[in-house]
Amino acid sequence: MTAPTNPQTDRAGRADDAAHVGQVGRADHADLHAPVIDWFTEHARDLPWRRDTAGPWGVMVSEFMLQQTPVNRVRPVYEQWLARWPRPADLAKEAPGEAVRAWGRLGYPRRALRLHGAAVAITERHGGDVPTQHAQLLALPGIGEYTAAAVASFAYGQRHAVLDTNVRRVFARAVTGVQFPPNATTAAERKLARTLLPEEEATAAQWAAASMELGALVCTAKNEECHRCPIASLCAWRLAGKPAHEGPPRRGQTYAGTDRQVRGKLLAVLRDALVPVPQADLDRVWDEPVQRARALDGLVDDGLVEPLAGGLYRLPQG
Ligand code: SF4
């Protein structure tokens, strides 16, 4: 699964240009590896999906949940999820609506359906074990390039470029010399990420996790803390005097009043109900009828809500 993209701002040309002005030359890329990995060894957060006990399924679940949701909101849901469904086959035998229910308030609930679909495919095609090969992972329903690379790298220690929002920001600053990456991932960024990958497999896997953590903890979108950054002396953006962002405006995270908010409210009613609910129960949570109907239609179209005869609704039963 990939983050939402904005075709108007996916400006590969601009990023290509930017990639060429990076002040850290290719020969110097390797200089970034050791400091970032050493920093990670000392400062990495102890997160449940990083423990050996998580296993490949735990890593996969965490990657679905973390893509658009912060760690502190994911952690309790992740722990309940793994306690209830410790193996893909445990989830696969449940109705998809149970995955949506357990997803709770993590947001973007289509991820729950996709994770359920992946669990079914893993059970049917791979004997219940999360496959080890990137191509097999990518062939699972609901798994995109990012998740396939992340699972192959974090669960199996393989060499893949894992390009999430945090990594993209670190690379944009440290290597390309700009404050923010483009709004949507570009071919130039993928190429740069491959160029930056250490040759040795285990080191590459460490680099993927370490560069991601650096972006999450030190080189954040709101506030870069260069004084505690292990690559401050090499960072192209910092060395250039931190020039202001010149690209397109960055995407906002508006929520209040959006269809997303209405969908969240409607879905919350269904998550809390153990029996099908009448339309009137849904009507109570949002006053504006046109927007409410549009949101409900969207949930039905996405397979997150199942309409029944008699004007009743429930979570999907499969
Ligand atoms: S030096 Fe500052 S801007 Fe550069 S990578 Fe480190 S935290 Fe980010």
Image: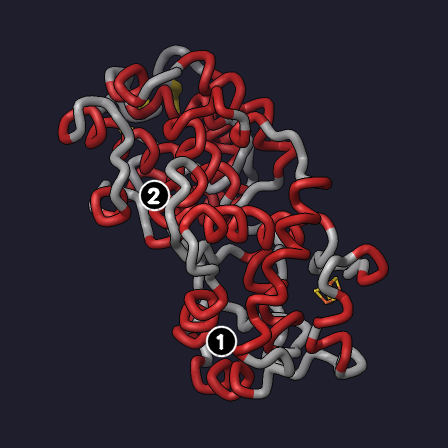
Residue drawn at (52%, 81%) of the image: 19
Name the residue carrying label 2: 297
Mark 1 residue type: Thr
Position of residue 272 in the picture relative to residue 131 (left or right): right
The quadrant where ligand 1 appears is: bottom right
Mark 2 residue type: Asp
Furthest residue in direction right, as rendered: 227
Residue drawn at (43%, 76%) of the image: 188
Mark with earlier residue (1, 2): 1
Q: Tell me, for residue 150, which label it has, or none.
A: none
Judge whether 119 appears above or below 194 on screen.
Answer: above
Q: Residues within 10 Å of mark 1 (few under 14, many from 20)?
A: some
Q: How are the residues colored?
A: secondary structure
> SS of the residue at dot 1?
helix
Residue drawn at (67%, 35%) of the image: 45
Q: Select label 1 or label 2 by which is in front.
A: 1
Q: Is residue 270 shown to the viewer in this render?
A: no
Name the residue carrying label 1: 9
